Amino acid sequence: IYANLLVCGFAGAGLKAITEKRWKLKNLKHTMNFLMLCGVLFSAVAHIDLIRGMSPSQELIDASLWIKGNTKENEIIFSKPSNGFIIEYFSKRKVMMNEFHYHSENFSGLLNDTREIYYSRNLDKTEKLLNKHGVRYILVDSQMYEGEVWKKPKEGLLFLFTNEEKFKTVYDEGGAKIIRYVK
């Protein structure tokens, strides 16, 4: 952050010096000002698309708000760790793992359990892990389906979701799904 502020300060000073400088060729001055304006506009347009694609997505916010309105306050939600803060903030519910857990003493155990839940096709093993952590709801967003977690359509937990007695889809909108785990 400090380096960014320093660079912005130098850029502003340089821009001020260029615009206040006395130019002998007025056409060159106008051309330079036009090119600088185009550069700033191009950079802004390029970053607008980047910012729009940043988290939290509207689908994740809507799913988290659904959780808040349709679940008990003590429910624990399972999703990918990078969704943890967003889910906790909007739903006011706990998550099995978020990015703060990286600094906890139990991090490696949580990470192993999370991976096991993602990729296990064994219902008994997955149920033991979900019960161990008290998970009742699983939130899956479109990024998880599109390769961030799973590469194939019926990989691991996605295969287990076909067991509708144990995993009931209670929310399915905008690419996000919430699955209720029935003990």
Image (cartoon, rainbow, N blue to C red):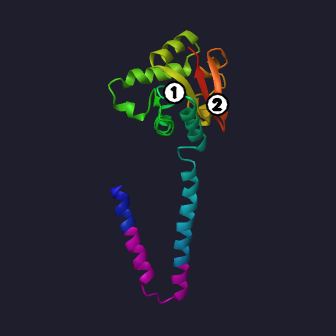
Q: In the rendered structure, which amino acid carries the disc numbered 2?
A: Tyr
In the image: residue 113, left or right of residue 165: left
Residue 140 rendering spot, x and y as whole percentages: 59, 30
Question: What secondary structure predominates along the stretch shown in magenta?
Answer: helix
Report helix, strand or loop for mark 1: loop
Callout 2: few (<14), some (14-19), or many (20+) C-alpha neighbours within 10 Å? some
* Residue denoted by label 2: 171
Residue pictured at 64% horizontal, 30% vertical: 171
Residue 169 rendering spot, x and y as whole percentages: 65, 25
Residue 98 rendering spot, x and y as whole percentages: 44, 32
Disc assigned to residue 72: 1
Q: Quadrant of residue 63?
A: top right
- Figure quadrant of the N terminus: bottom left
Looking at marks 1 and 2 on the same chain, the residue that comes earlier in the sequence is marked by: 1
Q: In the rendered structure, which amino acid carries the disc numbered 1?
A: Lys
**Callouts 1 and 2 close, C-beta under 8 Å:** no
Residue toward you, 58 or 24: 58
Q: Which residues are magenta?
A: 10-31
Residue toward you, 59 or 101: 59
User: Above or below — where is 64 with respect to 165?
Assistant: below
Residue 85 rendering spot, x and y as whole percentages: 46, 37
In the image: residue 163, left or right of residue 14: right
- Figure quadrant of the C terminus: top right
Disc assigned to residue 110: none
Residue pictured at 59% horizontal, 40% vertical: 62
What is the CA distance from the residue labelled 1 to the residue labelled 2? 16 Å
Residue pictured at 42% horizontal, 23% vertical: 110
Report helix, strand or loop for mark 2: strand
Q: Which of labels 1 and 2 is toward the front?
A: 1
